[in-house]
Image (spheres, rainbow, N blue to C red):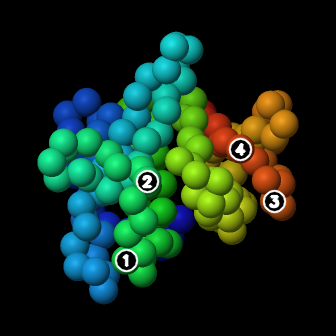
Amino acid sequence: MKLPRYELIAEKTLRVYAFASEGPKGQIQKLIKFSETALKGYYNLAFGDKNLETDDIDDKVVSNNGDSEQVLATVVAAVYMFTDANKDAWVYATGSTKTRTRLYRMGIAKYIDEIKSDFHVFGQWQGEWQEFQKDINYSAFLVRRKII
């Protein structure tokens, strides 16, 4: 995606990324983490504000810093970096709330043609996985980098 994004700082494992959102509410530290699930090769993408007391992700807080597209573009950049290093990885994502899941769905739908050039994209609807289509209220998303 050719959108402005924030500079990512990656840990050596390339499973944890940090960046700072900048907007009317100042700088807000964000974290992105890829955690392997019980299914080998499947990783959960967790994202949210960095809790400065615990150094962990708070995915419930609503920052409203006026830069949601730039933040989502930065998360997508992390997915690219992670899948560059883990070519066979499946990345699973869902929002911590229905509203956030809807926001992610709208972001994917808006850029689906560009995303599909590099990723296989699936949505979970009524407990089943299907190739992503616009205007379906998916409960989760699954992507895998296309091997070229």
Q: Give whichever of discs 2 and 4 has the lower sequence position.
A: 2
What's under tag 4, amino acid-wise?
Ser
Circles 2 and 3 in contact, beta carbons < 8 Å:
no
Q: Disc 3 on helix, strand or loop? A: loop
Report how far apart the C-alphas of labels 2 and 4 lie in the structure.
17 Å
- Mark on residue 134? 3
Report how far apart the C-alphas of labels 2 and 3 lie in the structure.
26 Å
Report how far apart the C-alphas of labels 1 and 3 lie in the structure.
27 Å
- The residue that mark 2 highlights is 60
Q: Considering only vertical position in the picture, is 37 above or below 110? A: above
Question: Horizontal and vertical percent for residue 103?
Answer: 62, 63
Q: Give whichever of discs 4 and 1 has the lower sequence position.
A: 1
Query: In the picture provided, is 85 more to the left or to the right than 10?
Result: right
What's under tag 2, amino acid-wise?
Lys
Residue 88 visible to an observer of this rendering: no
- The residue that mark 4 highlights is 139
Label 1 Cα crowd, 10 Å radius (few <14 / some 14-19 / many 20+) = some
What's under tag 1, amino acid-wise?
Asn
Query: In the picture provided, is 90 more to the left or to the right than 77?
Result: right
Eye-nearest disc, 1 or 2:
2
Residue 14 visible to an observer of this rendering: yes
Q: Give whichever of discs 2 and 3 has the lower sequence position.
A: 2
Say which residue appears at 82% left-offset and 31% top-offset: 128
Q: Give whichever of discs 1 and 2 has the lower sequence position.
A: 2
Report how far apart the C-alphas of labels 4 and 3 lie in the structure.
13 Å
- The residue that mark 1 highlights is 65
Label 2 Cα crowd, 10 Å radius (few <14 / some 14-19 / many 20+) = few
